[in-house]
Amino acid sequence: MSCKSGNSSVQDGGCEFRGFPSKCHCGLDVVIYTSKTKQNPGRPFFRCPTLNDDHLFKWVEDCVYEEVVDTKSKISIIDNEINNAKSEVQVEISELKWMINELKENGTWSKREIKRIKVWLVCICLTVTVIVILLLFTTKNQNLVIGY
């Protein structure tokens, strides 16, 4: 995991890792330093605390650039997943609207059927009541004849 002398650029693949380093290949935690050279005054970099030239050295802006580049593809994947989820939700919403309309139609049909059944029940009740009343009145006035 080393980038020797800091001359390695992000584009030439001089480092064996991408993004922010946390450990050197020797196993030590990486430390962030600030350059005091005339060429790079105040420029931050990561380096192995052993300060050996063959250990890790990487400019912070290179790490940031790599993180951004790597994140772009992840964001693109997430964006596609969000768009797929949106289209799936739209399909489900359409199906639910269709089901709601079907239920409304069924509810309207059921109400009509209930009204028809009520009308038939009222007619049957009135008919039975009329028949019972007629039977009661006709049997009071008739004499029961037994035999001939």
Image (cartoon, rainbow, N blue to C red):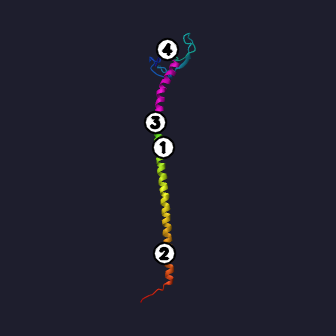
Q: Are marks 1 and 3 in contact (CB under 8 Å)?
A: no
Counting other residues with Cα less than 10 Å from the Cα at mark 2, is it few (<14), some (14-19), or many (20 or more)?
Answer: few
Tell me if residue 75 is in the magenta stretch: yes
Cα distance between the residues tagged 1 and 4: 56 Å
Q: Residue furthest top?
A: 38
Q: Disc 4 vs disc 3: which is toward the camera?
A: 3
The residue positioned 48% from the left and 75% from the top of the image is: 131
Counting other residues with Cα less than 10 Å from the Cα at mark 1, is it few (<14), some (14-19), or many (20 or more)?
Answer: few
Cα distance between the residues tagged 2 and 3: 69 Å
The amino acid pointed to by label 2 is Ile
Mark earlier in primary sequence (2, 3): 3
> Which stretch is magenta?
55-84
Dot 3 falls on a residue whose secondary structure is: helix
Dot 1 falls on a residue whose secondary structure is: helix
Residue pointed to by mark 2: 131
Residue 92 position in % (x across, y down):
46, 43
Residue pointed to by mark 3: 84
Q: Disc 1 vs disc 4: which is toward the camera?
A: 1
Residue pointed to by mark 4: 6
Residue pointed to by mark 1: 93
